[in-house]
Image (cartoon, rainbow, N blue to C red):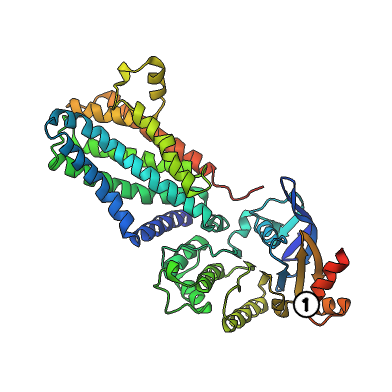
Amino acid sequence: MIFHIRATFATTKRILQQLSHDHRTLALIFVVPCLLMGLLSWLYVDNVKVFQSIAPSLLAIFPMVIMFLITSIATLRERTTGTLERILTMPIAKTDLIFGYGFAFGLLATLQAVIVATISLNWLGVDIQGPNELLILIAVVDALLGVALGLLASAFARTEFQAVQFMPAIIIPQLLLCGLLVPLSKMPDALESIARLLPMTYAVEAMQNITTQATTSSETWRDILTVIAWVVVAITLGSLTLRRRSK
Amino acid sequence: MSNFAIDVDDLSVQKKQKILLGSVSFRVEQGAIVGLLGPSGAGKTTLMRTLMGIQIPTAGKVEVLGKNAGDKANRSKIGYVTQAPSVYGDLTVKQNLSYFATLVGADKKAVAAAIKKVRLHGKDKQLVATLSGGERTRVSLAVALLGDPELLVLDEPTVGLDPILRRDLWKIFSEMARDGKTLIISSHVMDEAEHCEQLLLVRDSVLLWNEGKDKLLNTTNESSVEDAFIKLMEAEK
């Protein structure tokens, strides 16, 4: 047990060390979403109401997209450079590795979500009726969803080119159907039922709820739990794709 | 349970229609240095992957350290170096070794010792990506030395290294063998056979020779392993 805890945190530490040598990536992770939110608030400078209604949803979407990309490429690199194969010949458990990854990127995602949310709430005029902590919690959970889906997607890519192509394939349909462009109730029935199957829909719904409701409804909590359930399922499926042996 | 470090019997590996290894059998005694020689594409890497349990055999028996290849109990007992150095380019030498040390349960002393053995001390704070190809190979080799493994499976560990370092590494290998460790080392350079007690010559997925070097030279009536190998190949036709 102690060995597995050690192996998990050694993996987390190793991934953070790798990133600490890569200043440009770190800057991109933390600065880009802030700039995007700034750009958006500027775009709607004459229409603050619109900005305030969509900004919280975007706070859920940006971390997910960025963490998805970073995680899928990082994991794929581990597969293609042979380090994954080497690690799997050692006594470490597959779950140690997955949790190690989850913690490292989860930590980054949390930092990112806190920074973007703080800037948006304090300086960009984002104003929500519900508690600010909940906004950050939803952003973090959604970033973790990006990590989990990225881990899973990397198993189906052989090259980094393919991994990048998974973004339009997996993320953009969710973006179109999540309720940001057209509210779920106004969609054709078939599309609404598809949207109800996708995790981003719930993250955006939770954000929309806390934007307009001062007290947190049970629907909001159900939405958050749905996203968490997706994280767990995607991580479990992702760990099944790590194989020690091949035919 | 056999007393051999490696016991391979009638091993075949087939991927789709392609035969990667055909009916290979050999045994390796504990404490031996085995040279796995052959041109690239012969099946050396496939054989090593099979010993590590990464490649599942299509048929045949593969026992390593008394267990089936890939057995959980073997994971902390075998040091494995792949052909392409599998270490993290965006970590320093020391960070790489410290990480892998945790995974095999080795301590800080083992990290320092391993770095010293491959003569990379003084470069331990350098990023692996900025090292030369030969230095990266040595980092990868150092990882395999961590945790005091009973068996070392080394896939072309000396390629591209300067002759003095190569000699020193072979010295380390023989010291380890004297301590009772078993080593199986692949190479496509025939003169490395010099250092090995047992030679496995593979070509086109088939094992052509599995005996000592002297016997090889005597049998083929040649003076170098290279020539002996050529004679064996021609006899095969």
Residue B58 percent location from the top left of the image: 74, 48
In the image, A30 versus A43, the foreground residue is A43
Residue B166 sits in which quadrant? bottom right
A46 to A153, vertically: above or below = above
Q: Which residue shows up at 84% across the image and 70% down it? A: B232
Decide if residue B181 is in sight here.
yes
Residue type, mark 1 in image: Val
A3 to B161, vertically: above or below = above
Residue A135 percent location from the top left of the image: 23, 36
Residue A139 percent location from the top left of the image: 28, 39
Q: Which residue shows up at 82% across the image and 80% down it? A: B214
Q: Is B186 on the left-hand or right-hand side of B199?
A: left
Q: Which residue shows up at 75% across the image and 76% down it? A: B197
In the image, A80 versus B35, the foreground residue is A80
In the image, A65 versus B93, the foreground residue is A65
Q: Is B195 on the left-hand or right-hand side of A142?
A: right
The chain holding disc 1 is B
In which quadrant is the N terminus of chain B drawn? bottom right
Residue B91 percent location from the top left of the image: 41, 64
In which quadrant is the C terminus of chain B drawn? bottom right
Q: Secondary structure at mark 1?
A: helix
Q: Which residue is mark 1?
A: B225
